């Protein structure tokens, strides 16, 4: 590993439950209908824009996408104090800094949420990319290709960039960018992430510190 890129939700912050609660609340407020567990599970790892489209179509009102997203984002930003760091996240980032290895965040989440959560936890992050930075979010390769540019790594060195992801969509994006995918099993079992193409899987970043040995 010569550099690292991190997804944000489920890798740096344990925010997936709050995100799902936000979608549930927004959907109920607009349509007075509950989202079932299977639907909620299918949303994990998808971009905010993609989820807005899915839920708008499911409701029968596709034009409600923007309002769903607006309400969901407002809920999450009002719930920052309930979003903890993933175990070992602060220590892992500090070790990368100590070794002077370049790193950054590449997420499908809106930049406003990433910025607010970084500030809330006082994290030293060299750069972050969010949903507004891409034409095609994960599972497309574009987010991680742009992350490599921010790191200053040419395409032939992409394999030396370790990407930490908690979803199959994110792993697909990392592999499409010819990077080395590492699974963080905060949402899914290791078998699923390994099947998707992760080289190794860990419960959290505390466990993943062994990669530094």
Image (tube, rainbow, N blue to C red):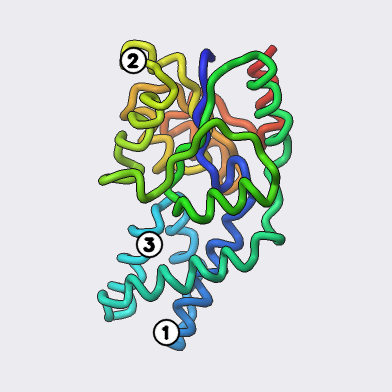
Expressed as whole percent of the image width and height from the top left, the position of residue 87 reads 72, 40
Tag 1 secondary structure: helix
Q: CA distance from mark 2 to mark 3?
A: 32 Å
Q: Which mark is residue 154?
A: 2
The tag earlier along the polypeptide, 2 or 3, is 3
Report the residue marked by disc 1.
30
Instruction: Look at the numbered discs 3 and 1 and tell me whether their residues touch, using CB distance below 8 Å.
Output: no
Q: Is residue 163 above or below residue 46?
A: above
Question: Image check: 15 left or right of 152?
Answer: right
Expressed as whole percent of the image width and height from the top left, the position of residue 32 reads 46, 88
Closer to us: mark 2 or mark 3? 2
Tag 2 secondary structure: loop
Q: Is residue 41 above or below residue 8?
A: below
Would you identify the image quadrant in which residue 60 lies?
A: bottom left
Instruction: Look at the numbered discs 1 and 2 and tell me whether their residues touch, using CB distance below 8 Å.
Output: no
Residue at 35% from the left image edge and 31% from the top image edge: 146
Report the residue marked by disc 3.
51
Furthest toward the bottom, the residue is 32
Residue 139 appearing in the image? yes
Residue at 69% from the left image edge and 21% from the top image edge: 95
Expressed as whole percent of the image width and height from the top left, the position of residue 156 reads 32, 11
């Amino acid at each position: 590993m010569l550099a690292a890129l991190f997804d944000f939700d489920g890798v740096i912050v344990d925010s997936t439950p709050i995100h799902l609660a936000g979608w549930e609340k927004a959907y109920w407020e607009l349509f007075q209908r509950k989202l079932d567990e299977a639907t909620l599970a299918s949303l994990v790892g998808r971009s905010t824009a993609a989820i807005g489209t899915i839920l708008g179509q499911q409701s029968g009102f596709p034009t409600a996408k923007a309002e769903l997203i607006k309400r969901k984002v407002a809920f999450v930003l009002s719930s920052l104090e309930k979003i903890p760091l993933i175990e070992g996240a602060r220590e892992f980032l500090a070790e990368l800094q100590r070794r002077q290895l370049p790193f950054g965040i590449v997420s499908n989440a809106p930049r406003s949420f990433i910025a607010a959560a970084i500030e809330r936890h006082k994290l030293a992050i060299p750069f972050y990319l969010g949903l507004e930075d891409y034409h095609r979010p994960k599972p497309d390769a574009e987010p991680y290709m742009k992350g490599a540019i921010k790191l200053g790594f040419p395409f032939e060195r992409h394999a030396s960039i370790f990407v930490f992801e908690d979803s199959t969509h994110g792993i697909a994006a990392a592999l499409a960018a010819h990077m080395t995918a590492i699974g963080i099993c905060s949402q899914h079992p290791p078998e699923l992430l390994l099947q998707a193409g992760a080289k190794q899987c860990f419960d959290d970043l505390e466990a993943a510190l062994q990669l530094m040995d």
